[in-house]
Amino acid sequence: MVVEFTIWVCLWMTASISKATAQSVAKPNCQDSCGNISIPYPFGIGENCYHDNWYEIFCNTSSSPPRPFLRRFSLEVEQINFEVNQTLTVRIPMQLREAWSGTGYDVMQGNSPNLTGSPFLFSSKDNVFLVGGCTGSALLLDSRNQILAGCATICPQQGSSMPSSENCYGVLCCQTIIPSSLVFYRTNFTTSSNSYENNSNIPNSAALIESNSVSKFIQNPTEQNFKPYPTVFQWTIMDLRTDSPGYENSTCETDERGGHNCRCKALFFKGNPYLPHGCQVVQDCEDCIQGCVVLGIDSYRCPIVDPTCQTSRAPSLGVGFIIAAVHILLILFGFCIYKMMKKRRENRIKAKFFKQNGGLLLKRQMSSNGGVVDKTRVFTSEELEKATDHYNKDRILGQGGQEVPLLVYEFIPNGTLFQHIHDPIEEFPLTWKKRLQISTDVAAALAYLHSASSIPIYHRDVKSSNILLDSRFRAKVSDFGTSRSITIDQTHLTA
Ligand SMILES: *[C@@H]1O[C@H](CO)[C@@H](O)[C@H](O)[C@H]1NC(C)=O
Ligand SMILES: *[C@@H]1O[C@H](CO)[C@@H](O)[C@H](O)[C@H]1NC(C)=O
Ligand SMILES: *[C@@H]1O[C@H](CO)[C@@H](O)[C@H](O)[C@H]1NC(C)=O
Ligand SMILES: *[C@@H]1O[C@H](CO)[C@@H](O)[C@H](O)[C@H]1NC(C)=O
Ligand SMILES: *[C@@H]1O[C@H](CO)[C@@H](O)[C@H](O)[C@H]1NC(C)=O
Ligand SMILES: *[C@@H]1O[C@H](CO)[C@@H](O)[C@H](O)[C@H]1NC(C)=O
Ligand SMILES: *[C@@H]1O[C@H](CO)[C@@H](O)[C@H](O)[C@H]1NC(C)=O
């Protein structure tokens, strides 16, 4: 049995599963990249390739390399993540304070793209509100002009060296974290000093930008108005039927907006969880059936459970399963045979005891008396099973040695004489009259056994605990475990 089990485990471990082919992250028959930027579904290039037109990507092939744009917002796309973070990096223009107007700088107000109602929002995790120049301060406002954030910059002291390019601590540059769930913002530049004139070569600008790009911004503070900076959107997908069978290898969470954020259900599944049949097991893990060990990025191996199993690789799934099925059948067959043998042995033992304990004699007497031996009734095992609720353990009063045939007694409700002598109960006092009655009953029973029955029987164990009292306190002699039948000419017996 143990050997059988080990073989079965080995087969199970080495049986291979169907091959997964390297999958495109885009919908079938759709372009999955623009230039060197990957465009995973729900984003897509061309009709029927995106989930809905919020995700439509326009690939401008006139430039070299081709550059993707988010069509609804005309924003250039830098990166789309779908595996760990559902993020979309786009370039948005910095919001700038306008030029010198003669009397002062015009305080300009710029609007961000309006993401209201879209599946996108500004990622508070990945962006900071960055203000360049030395305008005083800039405020981040929502669509109702509520102030959400603000930070102030000062100009470098006269004669002091310019701050190091990695610093964004308030001199020429400040940054602050932003609240979550932002879909729209404006910036207000406020005037707080008259130092602009002396630093007019430093443009004043503000935007939500990807925190990783802050250092690039500082390295080049005078050029940021020429080039939009990357900002990160979090995206989600609202109406995806992830309960349909194609998504069995994806797991999805619903966010507070009711959107789905999905991933492949285990690290060794790769592919696009938003596409039906998108997640497939990686090639290195194809032959493992008991999960896979992830060693690092794109590095996997099957768990080695038992090295002895490695040498006996089953050639394919089909053969593996056939061999396994044959083993299961063998095990089941063996089990059935074992059960049958056990049953037959039990029946043989029963028959033996029946013979040994006078069952045949009983049968003979029964047939000669028309099925009745004195006042004895024979119960079948089915009847007994029913009466005892399948030999329910709760109903066992006490146990002695049994097999077959068994003696079935009437139920004696008042216990033994022993109990009444040693532990008298008030409701049934043993009056002298009752005691005499019991003695007479016992004497009569013994007299019957010794002389009136066809074969004389010596009880050999007459004691108060073997004398039972029925509902009317009539005595019954019981426990014939040590009794003997004797031939007429025997006069006495020794124990
Ligand atoms: C795409 O190519 C450009 C220039 O060749 C490179 O700077 C950029 O990092 C590449 N982007 C990706 C996602 O590989
Ligand atoms: C595509 O890119 C080229 C070159 O950068 C530009 O001239 C053109 O206007 C772009 N087309 C569209 C539709 O944006
Ligand atoms: C996901 O976001 C976290 C936190 O912003 C970042 O550390 C991690 O590198 C991102 N992962 C990917 C695959 O972009
Ligand atoms: C943003 O878009 C929503 C929906 O299109 C609109 O109701 C709202 O007025 C817009 N907000 C601004 C500031 O343009
Ligand atoms: C933002 O700027 C506009 C235009 O100058 C001004 O009307 C508004 O009061 C400013 N909002 C705040 C909150 O400062
Ligand atoms: C700006 O420069 C002028 C002279 O170039 C100087 O007099 C003035 O104090 C400077 N203003 C500030 C705020 O530094
Ligand atoms: C789930 O992954 C298994 C293993 O790669 C593959 O056989 C099965 O087709 C996948 N199911 C779907 C719906 O993609």
Image: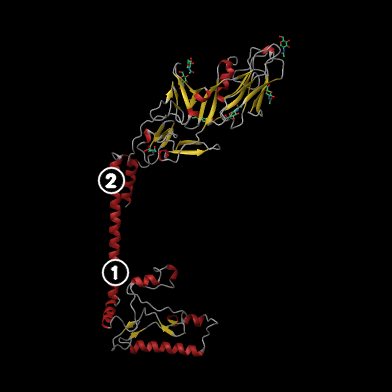
Quadrant housing residue 200: top right
Q: Is residue 119 above or below residue 414?
A: above
Tell me the colour scheme of the image.
secondary structure
Q: Is residue 153 above or below residue 413?
A: above
The one nearer the camera, 141 or 3, is 141
Question: Callout 1 environment at 10 Å: few (<14), some (14 to 19), or many (20+)?
Answer: some
- Residue 203 appears at what percent x and percent y? 63, 15
| Residue plotted at (27% across, 68% down) | 348
The residue under label 1 is which amino acid type? Ile
The one nearer the camera, 79 or 45, is 45
- Residue 212 appears at what percent x and percent y? 55, 24
Mark 2 or mark 1, which is nearer the start of the sequence?
A: 2
Residue beneath disc 1 = 349
| Residue plotted at (47% across, 90% down) | 436
The residue under label 2 is which amino acid type? Ile
| Residue plotted at (27% across, 65% down) | 344
Report ligand 5 position as a quadrant: top right
Residue beneath disc 2 = 323
The one nearer the camera, 408 or 26, is 26
Tell me: 331 left or right of 100: left
Quadrant housing residue 59: top left
Assign a secondary structure to mark 1.
helix
- Residue 103 appears at what percent x and percent y? 71, 12
Q: Is residue 81 visible?
A: no
Tell me: 489 left or right of 394: left
Q: Quadrant of the C terminus?
A: bottom left
Question: Callout 2 environment at 10 Å: few (<14), some (14 to 19), or many (20+)?
Answer: some
Tell me: 188 left or right of 28: right
Residue at disc 2, CB closer than 8 Å to ligand 7: no
- Residue 160 appears at what percent x and percent y? 67, 14
Residue 79's mark?
none
